[in-house]
């Protein structure tokens, strides 16, 4: 008899967003005439920018001509896109070699896939509340997970506890789900902790384009020493509306190394390259041409306009929380608003209440960890009309 991976039995029966979708579907079936506004899953609603679409069309035309057709591409990504990404990092004062950049189909995939490179024996440090993929992928591998508490008291920005040893550290900033964002001094402390513990930081910067405060870092590599201990994941999903187009990138510096018990050096960059060449066929050429267009002057202008649109929606939601006196974080350098559930409800109770009474969908904080039990997440990824209507309905709950 084949033996299955028993670690899967340790997972929750349903992925958070699958459970949300199931409840909404049931509600819609029972209430077909009611208009539901979705501010739950972090999916964008604006179309791709004109510059991106034109690049995609041109690339599709290339694929239809024998002289410009392309078959298998490099697993690491085409040089033209890796060069564009490296140029983007220079804006933050970060110098990267192009062979430290690996193009992917999104940050979610790579934050899970990167676990292939680490021994099962590693202790993983994960903040709570947290994006569920970090927990689930390490649970699938049977690793020991230690949680560090994010609470309202520390602004949902937990700092290192020197009494805890960790080998792998997950950080997401700006954070999903809380919208909180680490400053340079705080990240400097995390880098110091990682170096002290010979640990690797897995830094998720999928929302860096929403950082508007110039004093806040966009990349962990803005912190001295980070290129020796950190891998960074980023995505064009929210930056340029690529949730359905699928393109991101992972930075694996060549300075991140470890030594085996018998003294052999292992280089994470080489390992990731080997892993990708074995398990990944690369992102389609048409998509990579579209992604490269994002980093052009015209493409970045369009991306910034998208970000500004969503941040106006975030302001509408945040203003509602302030008007009602509800404690919240996010909405300034992040498209997420994380607030304390009203009426003494836990987050799943409030999810059902908000759906039933206001026909508005959000995400229960309990799905992100025990510290989210009494908190709730709304996203700014809708249009202004729907966001304003949703907040009008939200306010009506308090009358």
Image (tube, rainbow, N blue to C red):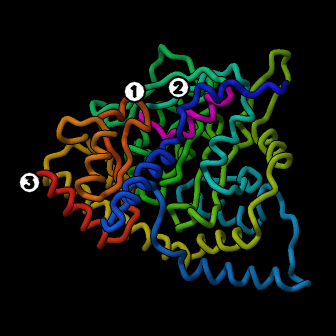
The quarter of the picture where residue 129 lies is: top left
Quadrant in which the C terminus is drawn: bottom left
Local SS, label 3: loop
- Segment tinted magenta in the rendering: 129-141
Q: Residues within 10 Å of mark 1 (few under 14, many from 20)?
A: some
Majority SS type along the magenta span: helix
- Please give the name of the residue rendered at 35% of the width and 51% of the height, measured from the top-left corner: 362
Instruction: In the rendered view, tell whether residue 364 sits above or below residue 194.
Output: below
Q: Is residue 127 visible?
A: yes
Residue 163 belongs to the span the image colors magenta: no
Crowdedness near tag 2: few (<14), some (14–19) or many (≥20) residues, C-alpha within 10 Å: many
Tag 2 or tag 1, which sits nearer the N-term? 1
Asked if residue 168 is positioned above or below residue 203 in the image, the reply reads above
Q: Residue furthest right?
A: 66
Comes first in the chain, label 3 or label 1: 1
Residue 140 lies, in percent from the top left, at 65, 30
Q: Is residue 312 visible?
A: no
Would you name the residue on which mark 1 appears?
149
Q: Quadrant of residue 37?
A: bottom left
Total residue callouts: 3
Q: Secondary structure at mark 1?
A: strand
Disc 1 versus disc 2: nearer the observer? 1
Pick whichever, 24 or 201, lies toward us. Answer: 24
Residue at which label 3 appears: 399
Q: Dot 3, crowdedness within 10 Å: few (<14), some or many (≥20)?
A: few
The reply to whether callout 3 and callout 1 are in contact (CB within 8 Å) is no
- Quadrant of the frame with the N terminus: top right
User: Spatial distance from mark 3 to mark 1, Cα to Cα?
Assistant: 34 Å
Distance Cα–Cα, label 2 vs label 3: 49 Å
Residue highlighted by disc 2:
193
């Amino acid at each position: 008899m084949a033996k299955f991976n028993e670690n899967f039995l340790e997972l929750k029966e349903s992925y958070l967003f699958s459970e949300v979708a199931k409840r909404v579907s049931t509600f819609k079936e029972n209430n077909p005439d009611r208009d539901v506004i979705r501010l739950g899953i972090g999916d964008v609603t604006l179309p791709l920018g004109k510059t991106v679409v034109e690049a995609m069309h041109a690339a599709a035309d290339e694929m239809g001509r024998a002289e410009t057709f392309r078959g298998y591409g490099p697993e690491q990504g085409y040089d033209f896109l890796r060069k564009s990404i490296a140029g983007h990092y220079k804006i933050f004062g970060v110098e990267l070699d192009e062979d430290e950049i690996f193009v992917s189909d999104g940050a979610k995939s790579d934050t899970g896939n990167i676990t292939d490179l680490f021994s099962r024996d590693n202790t993983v440090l994960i903040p709570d509340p947290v994006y569920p993929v970090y927990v689930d992928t390490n649970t699938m591998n049977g690793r020991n997970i230690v949680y560090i508490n994010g609470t309202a008291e520390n602004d949902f920005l937990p700092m290192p506890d020197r009494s805890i040893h960790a080998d792998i550290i997950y950080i997401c900033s700006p954070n999903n789900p809380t919208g909180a964002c680490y400053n340079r001094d705080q990240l400097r402390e995390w880098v110091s902790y990682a170096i002290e513990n010979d640990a690797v930081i897995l830094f998720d910067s999928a929302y860096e384009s929403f950082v508007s405060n110039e004093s806040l870092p966009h990349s962990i590599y803005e912190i001295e020493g980070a290129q020796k201990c950190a891998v960074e994941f980023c995505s064009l999903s929210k930056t340029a509306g690529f949730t359905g187009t699928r393109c991101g990138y992972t930075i694996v510096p060549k300075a991140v190394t470890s030594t085996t018990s018998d003294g052999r050096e292992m280089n994470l960059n080489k390992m990731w390259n080997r892993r990708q060449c074995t398990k990944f066929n690369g992102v389609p050429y048409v998509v990579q041409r579209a992604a490269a267009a994002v980093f052009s002057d015209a493409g970045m202008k369009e991306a910034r306009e998208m970000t500004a649109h969503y941040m106006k929606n975030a302001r509408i939601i945040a203003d509602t929380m302030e008007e009602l006196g509800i404690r919240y974080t996010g909405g300034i350098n992040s498209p997420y608003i994380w607030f304390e559930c009203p009426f003494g409800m836990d987050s799943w109770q409030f999810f059902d209440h908000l759906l039933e009474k206001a026909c508005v969908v959000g995400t229960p904080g309990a799905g992100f960890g025990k510290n989210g039990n009494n908190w709730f997440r709304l996203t700014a990824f809708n249009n202004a009309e729907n966001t304003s209507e949703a907040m009008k309905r939200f306010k009506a709950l308090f009358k």
